[in-house]
Image (spheres, rainbow, N blue to C red):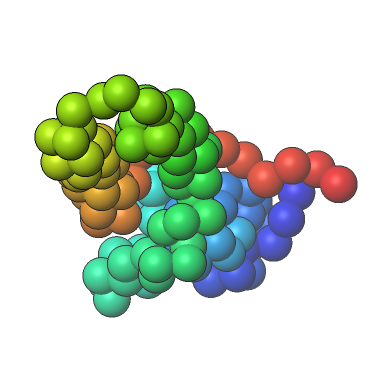
């Protein structure tokens, strides 16, 4: 068991999603996504944390864009309007991903992850 960084109890087995400090269940809010201190100060994720926590989604979007949109302009014999279509497709792919990352930074998905025992 780890020590809670807020109250000092020996039951700090949870991790705050925002500040990544050890918390016990009494120092977290009811939905178990953040500690009471982050909830009071209305902390948000920085861009660096947001990218790090959504790394898998960004890799998937990059792969999708590389596979579906990127090779189009390099294929011979395509109509010149394909460039506009590829830009529109890239924007349409990025809109839901950016919105998901924005709203996940405000209200992270509920998780009951406990810190690994080293």
**Foreground pick, 74 / 42:** 74
Is residue 60 among what the camera can see? no
Is 102 situated above or below 71? Answer: below
**Residue 76: percent from left, percent from top:** 37, 27
Is 24 situated above or below 57? Answer: below
Task: Give the residue drawn at x 30%, y 23%.
Answer: 77
**Residue 58: percent from left, percent from top:** 44, 43
**Residue 51: percent from left, percent from top:** 46, 56
Residue 97 falls in image quadrant: top left
**Foreground pick, 15 / 82:** 82
User: Going by the picture, which residue comes out furthest to the right?
Assistant: 118
Total numbered badges shown on the rendered structure: 0
Task: Give the residue drawn at x 67%, y 45%.
Answer: 115
Is 109 situated above or below 47? Answer: above
User: Going by the picture, which residue comes out furthest to the front?
Assistant: 77
Lateral position of residue 8 relative to residue 107, left or right: right
**Foreground pick, 92 / 96:** 92
Is 77 situated above or below 99? Answer: above
Lateral position of residue 84 relative to residue 111, left or right: left
Task: Give the residue drawn at x 60%, y 59%.
Answer: 22
Is residue 83 among what the camera can see? yes
Task: Give the residue drawn at x 60%, y 69%.
Answer: 5
**Residue 31: percent from left, percent from top:** 32, 42
Residue 7 falls in image quadrant: bottom right
């Amino acid at each position: 068991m780890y020590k809670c960084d807020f109250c000092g109890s020996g039951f700090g087995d949870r991790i705050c999603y925002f500040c990544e400090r050890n918390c016990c269940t009494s120092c977290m809010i009811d939905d178990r996504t953040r500690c009471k201190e982050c909830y009071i100060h209305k902390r948000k994720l920085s861009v660096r944390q947001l990218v790090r926590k959504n790394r898998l989604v960004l890799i998937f979007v990059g792969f999708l864009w590389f596979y579906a949109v990127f090779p189009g302009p390099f294929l011979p014999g395509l109509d010149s309007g394909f460039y506009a279509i590829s830009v529109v497709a890239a924007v349409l792919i990025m809109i839901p991903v950016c919105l998901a990352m924005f709203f996940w930074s405000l209200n992270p998905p509920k998780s009951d992850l406990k810190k690994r025992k080293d």
